[in-house]
Image (cartoon, coloured by chain):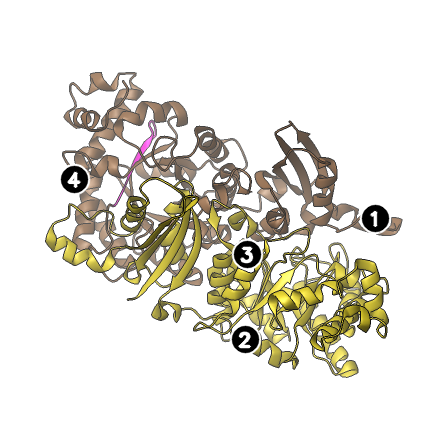
Chain colours: A brown, B yellow
């Protein structure tokens, strides 16, 4: 069968079988029971099918299969089919989505993925460390260069723009790309370490592709995209473009408007996991379960699983973000394993000895965890880590 | 001031002034209090400003102004600024959004709007009537032509594709456009009445513009777009394109994932009203307050007001949809006035004498309301209306 299967969370009670059947028909052939036999034969391959109906007394869970004969194989058509009108139809949340293999293969998945990004930076055996520019709005290119240099020198693997830094006269996109490359080349010469910088690709939708191609030409090493301010199909187009071919980091901005309710919208697993991976995100940021802006841990694990489980696509890097400091590294590795990116903003810039020391402290914490040392033991010999643990605390 | 002002609904209680200040700073310059005076001067024009804080004991309402110096003047940048990270930050809903006039003028608004569409079809003095193809999935072009002809002959002003009918081998987009034009030209010759057909513009984002231009060349009269399966900026690009210039009908598919929760996401007024109008939707479909798939009446009125109130843009046509039958016309006119589109699917096709009679019954109901007649009185002389009232009921 060639199809897309969607699972919905609805309130418990009532005739859920009938509800599921109404969905399966209403979003495909419209009606069924009273159709003439000939029309039933004609429409059979278009008819939605109820796969499963559960009611545990608290929630109803309905699973419906939609034949792929009904939609073009693009995300807008699939979303409109499985959660278009239905998103407006009372209390209902889309909690799972899967494609038959032939449909899945219509989507690119990540061009680089975990392995490809590890090859780009030559780091294979540990979680990566990423840091974020801090407070760049209203600042110029000198500040940009200083911040990038400090972060990269400290040993991070990736640096990303803040998602609210758009193309602007003080730090124009093109200049960020060019100067970013120069600084990172310099850091590589000085330290031997290759660092990627994800520049925020922003502006009008129909200009993004050309802008990304130019960025590639100018030596960009990665792109940041506010996918949900555009559309998943835009991400896919960028990932597929042979003239771009840069790692794409998907930012979750605006996604909370779709995912935050328990009763409505789309689950984090589907939106930030399944769909971002299919559309080609190489790295996916999502709120970590540790900070103020937090997701429940089971939701973050579900996202990370959807990004890394075995499918037809390369795995994407999970990037749990917000509230991260070196003392959390043991917990991060326990929860997300080695194939994750540890992403710190305040945890790098807020280090008492500056951003370079902040980055170094993360690397020291990772080394300690991977050699089964307690952070507090490692901190005896590592002043940056010691200062970080003093600042933010951290379990051993 | 050049800015965008956003209003948020949050839970009551706690220090809401501090919360608002954290938003205003966190989404602009990052920090403020401890900055050196020189930096404060430099950053002053970038700093977010708390405009208002209310707490009525049930809800908190925070209003924050974001200087336009911080973002490029496109919807993705604005959405990312005002509700990017913030959408992920606990219980919060974006309930209002306004642009200073210079920012507003960066957006096109509708190319046609209410007046332009009235001119296209030559109808100035009454609500318009629209009907929808029924069950076209799995059906061919003969069925398409028959349904279009029947609906158009009955006196509707617009006919739209079902939003789940994508480009497909049985009824390809190009053929629907060409045959649609032929049928509607025929109807105009026979009845003197001009009818618009909104073909569902679907497929990959970066193909939509060219496809819409081709549709225009082939004689398309209007476009339907599942805006929220793509992105608001895509709608804007289509509306602005000088080689398209067709009325664009925005379908609310998927929007419920953003709007349905009382506590999270984006209000219907902002999403389906303010933003769709700014981006250039000429007609905006939304669930009526009458049917099974219903919005609360105050939400539908808020959408309609945002679409029609005096701004720098042309007004867009509100199209309350779902659960509409001729007996509801008096209520529809009372709630939405003459400048609305009465949109019926089942209310046309489910008429006991067929779709043409269904369309006619709506026109008869509108005539009755506009001449201050009771529907039941009008039905004495109008058999189609009489049959509709018998089928679905209706207050006088």
For the residues labelled 1 and 2, say whether their Cβ atoms are less than 8 Å apart. no
Q: What residue sits right under mark 1 in the picture?
A: A40
Q: What residue sits right under mark 4 in the picture?
A: A190
Is disc 1 placed on a helix, strand or loop? helix
> Is A125 covered by the magenta stretch?
yes
The mark closer to the camera, 4 or 1, is 1
Is disc 4 placed on a helix, strand or loop? helix
- Callouts 4 and 1 in the same chain: yes
The mark closer to the camera, 3 or 4, is 3
Which range is magenta? A122-133
Q: What residue sits right under mark 3 in the picture?
A: B299
Q: Disc 1 versus disc 2: distance between alpha carbons?
A: 42 Å
Query: In the image, what residue occupies the spot 72% across and 60% down?
Result: B345
As drawn, the residue found furthest toward the right would be: A37
Q: Nearer the viewer, residue B391 or A374?
A: B391
- Callouts 1 and 2 in the same chain: no
Residue B309 in percent (x, y) is at 49, 70
Which chain letter matches label 1? A
Quadrant (top left, top right, bottom left, bottom right) of the N terminus of chain B: bottom left
Give the numbered dot on residue B148.
Answer: none
Which chain letter matches label 2? B
- Callouts 3 and 2 in the same chain: yes
The mark closer to the camera, 3 or 1, is 3
Residue B97 in percent (x, y) is at 41, 59
């Amino acid at each position: 069968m060639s199809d897309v299967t969607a699972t919905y969370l609805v309130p418990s009670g009532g005739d859920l079988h009938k509800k599921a059947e109404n969905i399966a028909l209403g979003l495909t052939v419209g009606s069924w029971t009273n159709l003439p036999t000939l029309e039933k034969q004609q429409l059979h391959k278009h008819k939605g099918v109820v796969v499963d109906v559960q009611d545990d007394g608290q929630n109803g869970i309905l699973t419906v299969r939609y034949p792929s004969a009904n939609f073009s194989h693009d995300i807008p058509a699939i979303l409109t089919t499985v959660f278009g009108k239905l998103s407006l139809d009372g209390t209902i949340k889309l909690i799972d989505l899967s494609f038959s293999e032939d449909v899945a293969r219509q989507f690119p998945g990540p061009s680089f993925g975990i392995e490809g990004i590890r090859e780009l930076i030559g780091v294979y055996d540990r979680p990566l460390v990423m840091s974020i520019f801090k407070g760049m709005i209203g600042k110029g290119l000198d500040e940009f260069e200083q911040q990038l240099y400090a972060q990269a020198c400290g040993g991070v693997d990736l640096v990303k723009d803040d998602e609210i830094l758009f193309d602007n006269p003080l730090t124009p996109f093109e200049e960020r790309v060019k100067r970013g490359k120069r600084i990172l080349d310099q850091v590589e010469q000085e330290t031997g370490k290759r660092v990627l910088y994800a520049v925020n690709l922003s502006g009008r939708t129909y200009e993004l592709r050309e802008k990304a191609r130019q960025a590639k030409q100018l030596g960009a090493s990665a792109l940041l995209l506010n996918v949900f301010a555009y559309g998943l199909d835009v991400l896919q187009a960028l990932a597929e473009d042979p003239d771009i071919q840069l790692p794409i980091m998907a930012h979750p901005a605006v996604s909370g408007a779709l995912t935050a309710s328990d009763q409505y919208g789309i689950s984090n697993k589907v939106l930030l996991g399944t769909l971002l991976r299919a559309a080609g995100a190489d790295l996916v940021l999502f709120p970590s379960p540790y900070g103020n802006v937090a997701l429940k841990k089971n939701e973050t694990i579900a996202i990370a699983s959807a990004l890394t489980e075995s499918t037809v696509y390369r795995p994407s890097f999970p990037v749990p973000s917000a509230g991260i400091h070196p003392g959390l590294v043991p917990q991060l590795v326990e929860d997300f394993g080695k194939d994750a990116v540890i992403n710190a903003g305040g945890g790098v810039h807020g280090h008492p000895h500056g951003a370079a020391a902040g980055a170094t402290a993360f690397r020291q914490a990772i080394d300690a965890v991977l050699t089964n040392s307690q952070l507090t033991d490692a901190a005896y010999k590592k002043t940056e880590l010691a200062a970080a643990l003093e600042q933010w605390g951290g379990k051993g």
